[in-house]
Structure formats: structure tokens, C-alpha cells
Amino acid sequence: MRCRQARHQLTRDLFYVIFGICIAIVLSWSGFFDLILDNLGNGVFASFIAGVFFTSAFTIAPSSVALVHLIETTPMFTVILWGALGALSGDIILFFFIRDRFADDLKNSLKPSFVRHIARSFHFGFLKWLAPILGAVVIASPLPDELGLTLLGLSKTRLAFLVPISFVMNALGIYLLARLVSIL
């Protein structure tokens, strides 16, 4: 029963991610982001707020669109710096409050023997050193930070390690997003 419920929660979460992407597309086409960003005024504050929302699976799409709109009117370095600080704030919140839920859903949707094998690998095997690296890469990628934070959490990463990694990787992610948009 727990397996079925966990799969249902993962399916529901995937639906919310896809729904968020659709909403971001509609809001971008409608000019809503331009209106909101104009009302926020200062590129620093808007970058920070967009950065906070750059971390969650449910808000990454609208946040990415907002960051792209900000880069058009605000110096790229300002957007990257303040967006990464906002994303760091969002990651810290996720790290403490949400990471266990995602890990529990994933763990409950898998067979118990497989979960034990994976858990053992995080403590003794190659995943002990690979998981933090993969977690950092996921944080820099367009993938939701919850997955990266879950990997960091499973490998017992301390907050003192998370803060610089999150800042640097989110700054890199925003920079790569800006570069990709400038190429297109």
C-alpha cells in the first residue's frame, strides 16, 4: 500500500511540474512577467525573488523565464549574483523542510531490498563520494534542486558544505541559462 501511495505522490508531483511549465509559457507569452518585473522595480530584488523560486520543481519554469526577462534589462552579473543568493536561500529552506519528503516518496516507491542496497552504498560504497558531486551537478542543471538536495541529504552533507556548493552551482546554472538564451 505504501508503494502505491508513494508512486501516486510522485505522479502528482510530476503533474505539478508539467503544469508549472505550462503556466510559465502562458505567463511569458502574455507579458505578465514583464508587468510583474516592472512593478518590482529594482533588478536586485526581482533577481533575488526569482532566484528563491529557481530551486523548486514546481516553480523552476516560471522563475527561469523571469530570470531571462531580467537579464534583458539588468546587468547579467547582478542577476546572477542576486539570483544565486535567492536560490541559496531557497535551497536552505528545501534542505531543512522538504528533502526528507521527496526521499521518503522515492524510498517507499521502491522495493525494500533495493532501498537497503542503495542506502548501504551511500555510506560505504562509491556513492559516498559520488552522491555529493551528482547533487551539486543537479543543483546547477535545470533539474529541480529537490533531487540534488536529496542526494546531498542521503550522503549526510553538512550545511557548511551545502552553502558554498549551492551558491556556486546556482550561479553557474543561471549563467548557463543566460548564455543559452543569448545564443538562441
Image: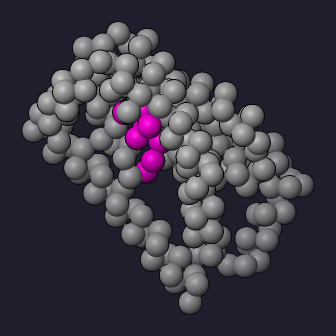
In the rendered image, the residue lying farthest to the right is 124
In the rendered image, the residue lying farthest to the bottom is 1
Q: Tell me if 97 is positioned left or right of 127 in this view.
A: left
Q: Which residue is painted at 81% across and 42% down in the image?
A: 129
User: Residue 124's spot in the image, x, y percent?
Assistant: 89, 55
The magenta segment is 50-57
Q: Is 90 above or below relative to 37?
A: below
3 or 92: nearer the viewer: 92
Q: Is 9 above or below relative to 19?
A: below
User: Residue 109's spot in the image, x, y percent?
Assistant: 59, 75
Q: Which residue is painted at 41% across and 28% down in the image?
A: 48
Mark count? 0
In the rendered image, the residue lying farthest to the left is 30
Q: Is 175 above or below relative to 3?
A: above
Q: Is residue 86 visible?
A: yes
Q: Which residue is painted at 68% across and 78% down in the image?
A: 111
The colour scheme of the drawn protein is one colour
Residue 51 belongs to the span the image colors magenta:
yes
The quarter of the picture where the C terminus appears is top left
Q: Which residue is painted at 38% across and 52% down in the image?
A: 58
User: Residue 170's spot in the image, x, y percent?
Assistant: 53, 30
Q: Is residue 127 visible?
A: no
Residue 23 belongs to the span the image colors magenta:
no
User: Residue 83's spot in the image, x, y percent?
Assistant: 44, 26
The quarter of the picture where the N terminus appears is bottom right
Q: Tell me if 162 is positioned left or right of 175 in this view.
A: right
